[in-house]
Image: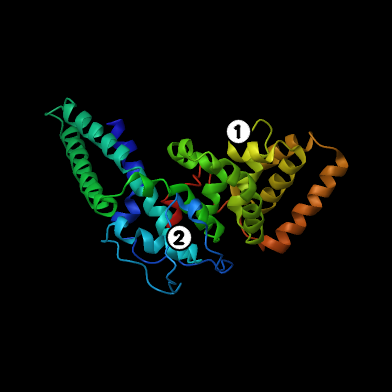
Amino acid sequence: MRYILIALLALVALIGAYVLGRGQSPTAPAAAAPAAPARASQLGGHAASTAPVPITASLPGRSVPLRRVFGELRSRADAGDVAAATRLYQDLRTCAGLDQLEWFLTRAADETLADKIDGSSAQSLERYRLQLEAVESHKQAIRKARTLCDGLDRGILDTQLPSLRRAAQLGEEHARACYLSSGPGYDARGLMRHPEWIQEYRTGVRSLIDAGMAAGDWKVVDILRRAYEPGADGMLAGTLGPDAVQHYRYLKLYRLGAQGARTADMDRKLALAAARIRPEQRADADRWAQETLQSQFGGSDSTESTAPGWDPCSLAASEE
């Protein structure tokens, strides 16, 4: 039974949006501007088409297999089309995880069928019926996703991280948050064949951080306050290095934007962070946080888009 619940969550994150008809073009952020075409090496070795594609053009239909429209989407992403870049990284994410999800769902179905059912209990029979219906529904969802992913080769799947990075560079906020928080670890299998991704991440994160702050993106603030936290682990923490003053700065900014029940917890964390830096450093950080809140975040709520346990790389989150 536990596998049914976990499989349901995985399906929502990976292919729920596709099955529910996520066919409209994502809206380009106001700040996103056309960028120079990426090098072919940045896209897993696939040469990009030189044919210009209008950024206002509609995206290909959802019923068309990704392998047939991959070149078009990639070319448009290279040209600065954020909608195409977003569609591409999301579809690649779905296809890259589909085999594992299908195996997991098969295991969940086997466990459900093996359960001993109390035939005398109407409640037990109803629960069993609902589980079987869930298994069948999820199998149908996977079959639909298979249409999207049919015929993709490893070369295309290896562009998963570069496609995510491209969408992040174009200002797609969910791609930016995912790439900052996960880095090349987003596609560990591909990283083994492309170690150069680590250096590209190191040299590119600062511009993404600056863009996120300029856009008033609380996701970036939340990611940074955690990356600078003492003892923090992960790609971004390793790239930025430990910094008690920066940790306090971003934590203070996040606290100034926080509302509701989370403020008390933020105050406790701020007190601990303040104890690690000098009074003059704290005063300077307080001024910076207040000025940044007013100039770049417009009094918005930091906790609204960063609920406890939020996943920067969730496809479900990217469909909000």
Please tell me how crowded label 1 is: few (under 14), some (14-19), or many (20+) other residues with Cα within 10 Å. Answer: few
**Residue in the foreground of this view, choosing between 193 and 179:** 193
- Residue 43 percent coordinates (x, y): 46, 52
**Residue in the foreground of this view, choosing between 242 and 200:** 200
- Residue 112 percent coordinates (x, y): 20, 31
The residue that disc 1 covers is 233
Q: How many marks?
A: 2
Please tell me how crowded label 2 is: few (under 14), some (14-19), or many (20+) other residues with Cα within 10 Å. Answer: many
Name the kind of residue labelled 2 in the image.
Ala
Who comes first in sequence, dot 2 or dot 1? 2
Quadrant position of the N terminus in the picture? top left
Q: CA distance from mark 2 to mark 1?
A: 29 Å
Inspect this view and state whether residue 164 appears: no
**Residue in the foreground of this view, choosing between 48 and 287:** 48
Q: Is residue 10 left or right of residue 237?
A: left
| Residue in view at x 52 percent, y 52 percent | 165
Q: Is residue 294 left or right of residue 119?
A: right
Quadrant position of the C terminus in the picture? bottom left
The residue that disc 2 covers is 85
Q: Is residue 199 left or right of residue 72?
A: right
Task: Name above or below for residue 122 compared with residue 16.
Answer: above
**Residue in the foreground of this view, choosing between 5 and 51:** 51
Task: Name above or below for residue 318 compared with residue 229.
Answer: below
SS of the residue under disc 2: helix
Q: Nearer the viewer, mark 2 or mark 1?
A: 2
Tags 2 and 1 touching, CB below 8 Å: no
| Residue in view at x 35 percent, y 48 percent | 94
